[in-house]
């Protein structure tokens, strides 16, 4: 990371440089050598704080309640799991403000009864691709003017820091249809969710879902 990018990132968390000035690249460059050394130490402390943030975690959240009778219609959702992960900061740790990135979802829908009497379901798994960071989400474009005077004239240059681009896009969904014979199979598992069929008709489904294990955040790869 360049000095300009690093200081611009820190400016979000630290509006002052330690000398009471607005934190910018020119603020750093315009200090005396001793002032720069003090400022470097000051910024290193902030960097250590950022590095001390927790590691990136991934999360899954089941939308529907468990261990209770639920109903859905033909084409309706049986259950949906939403995925997310921590927003990374400049040093690859979790954002200290708790920002999250959308990581897609897993959804099961009821599609009715087939001609041979089996229950038809449709499962869709959607994932995302993201290059978002705390700098791209919270940062802003900044311009600084470094001026020097010669006699009655003033010269200088303008330096502009552009906020890095960041976006999260949905990848092509992975969708699969399958059918079960409810007379022989009253329950089935999709991921960590067990679905138990109570009653099924061509236009509706009554069921209970349970989680096969506790929802513990898992470390991001």
Image (tube, rainbow, N blue to C red):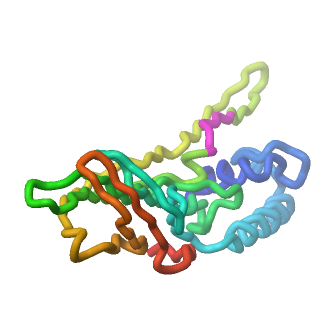
Give the number of callouts: 0
Q: Residue at x 62, y 50 (%)?
A: 4
Residue 130, quarter of picture:
bottom left
Which residue is situated farthest in the top direction here? 152
Q: Position of residue 201 (x, y in %)?
A: 27, 52
For the N terminus, give its image quadrant. Answer: bottom right
Q: Which residues are magenta?
A: 138-144
Q: Is residue 221 above or below residue 85?
A: below
- Residues 174 and 63: in front is 63
Residue 85, image x, y percentages: 52, 62
Residue 174 in sight in this render: no
Whether residue 144 is visible to the viewer of this picture, yes or no, is yes
Residue occupying image coordinates x 81% and y 65%: 37
The residue most toward the right is 20
Image position of 87 (left or right of 38): left
Q: Considering only vertical position in the picture, is 16 above or below 85? A: above
């Amino acid at each position: 990371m360049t000095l300009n990018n690093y200081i611009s990132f820190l400016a979000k968390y630290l509006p002052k440089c330690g000398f009471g000035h607005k934190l910018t690249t020119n603020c750093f460059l315009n200090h005396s050598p001793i002032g720069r050394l003090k400022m470097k130490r000051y910024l290193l402390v902030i960097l250590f704080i950022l590095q001390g943030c927790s590691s990136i975690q991934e999360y899954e959240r089941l939308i529907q309640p468990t261990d209770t009778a639920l109903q859905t219609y033909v084409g309706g959702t049986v259950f949906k799991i939403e995925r997310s992960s921590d927003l990374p900061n400049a040093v690859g740790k979790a954002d200290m403000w708790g920002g999250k990135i959308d990581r897609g979802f897993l959804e099961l829908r009821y599609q009715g009864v087939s001609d041979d009497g089996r229950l038809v379901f449709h499962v869709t798994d959607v994932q995302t691709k993201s290059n978002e960071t705390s700098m791209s989400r919270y940062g802003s474009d900044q311009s600084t003017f470094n001026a020097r005077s010669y006699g009655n004239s003033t010269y200088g240059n303008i330096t502009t820091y552009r906020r890095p681009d960041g976006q999260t896009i949905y990848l092509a969904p992975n969708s699969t249809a399958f059918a079960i014979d409810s007379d022989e199979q009253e329950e089935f598992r999709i991921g960590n969710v067990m679905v138990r069929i109570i009653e099924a008709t061509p236009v509706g489904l009554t069921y209970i879902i349970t989680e096969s294990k506790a929802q513990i955040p898992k470390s991001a790869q």
